[in-house]
Amino acid sequence: LVAIGALLINDLKIEKKFKILCKPRINNILSEYFINLTGISNEDIKKKGYDFEICLKKFLDFCGNNILYSYGNDFHIFDENINLYNLKNFNLNKKMFKDIRPYFDHNNINTKLYSSGSIYKSVNLRVNIDNIHDPLFDSLSIFKTIKYLEN
């Protein structure tokens, strides 16, 4: 896990944004493929990155007791990294992680055709894109699509 992005939403309004870069301990040099895909560079990680344990604590503090919706259920990604880094102090509650894709499926959107960063295309929204693989943009893409569907 190299980056985490999230939005705190209340009444279809963004209350807070969260984005943090994580310094990988094991594969600590990002590949050219990853850099091109995400726009995150090794220099970004070196200057702005934090150890995963710090990132996870900040993320969980940001989330509080809220349910964590993601495109797919991200519990396994966090859990895998917790185990990889042998962080025994973190015991995530699997029930707080939910997959948002059934919401889109219920609204007749074939989620197999879209990623979290491209789901906005399913309803023909136009957005200013920096990088569709940026974790905060992915959250914004999901949010803007839900807001469109709810309105």
Image (cartoon, rainbow, N blue to C red):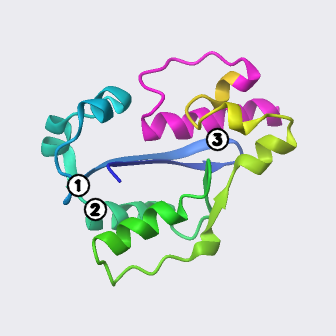
Left or right of 20 on screen, residue 9: right
**Residue 131 percent location from the top left of the image:** 43, 25
Q: Residue at the location (42% across, 22% down)?
A: 130
Give the mark nearer the N terminus: 2 vs 3. 3
Q: CA distance from mark 2 to mark 3?
A: 29 Å
Give amino acid for label 2. Phe
Q: Is residue 22 above or below residue 57?
A: above
Name the residue tied to disc 2.
52
- Where does the image place residue 69, in percent across and percent down from the top left? 62, 55
Q: Quadrant of residue 99?
A: bottom right
The local crowd at label 2, few if under 14, some if 14 to 19, many if 20 or more residues have their Cα within 10 Å, is many
Give the residue pinned by disc 1.
24
Residue 66 drawn in magenta: no
Q: Which residue is mark 3?
A: 13
Does 86 sit left or right of 80 as displayed? left
Measured in 3D between alpha carbons, the distance from the residue under mark 1 to the one under mark 3, in whole angstroms, is 33 Å
Q: Residues within 10 Å of mark 3 (few under 14, many from 20)?
A: few
Between 41 and 65, the one nearer to me in the picture: 41
Disc with the residue nearer the chain's start (2 vs 1):
1
Circle 3: residue type = Lys
Please name which of the two marks, 2 or 1, marks the residue nearer to the observer. 1
Q: Residues within 10 Å of mark 1 (few under 14, many from 20)?
A: some
Magenta part of the chain: 122-151
* Occupied quadrant, residue 62: bottom left
Residue 10 locus on image (x, y percent): 66, 50
- In the foreground, 131 or 33: 33
Callout 1, which amino acid? Pro
Secondary structure beneath disc 2?
A: helix
Quarter of the rendering occupied by the N terminus: bottom left
Location of residue 125 with respect to 84 vertically, above or below: above
Q: CA distance from mark 2 to mark 1?
A: 7 Å
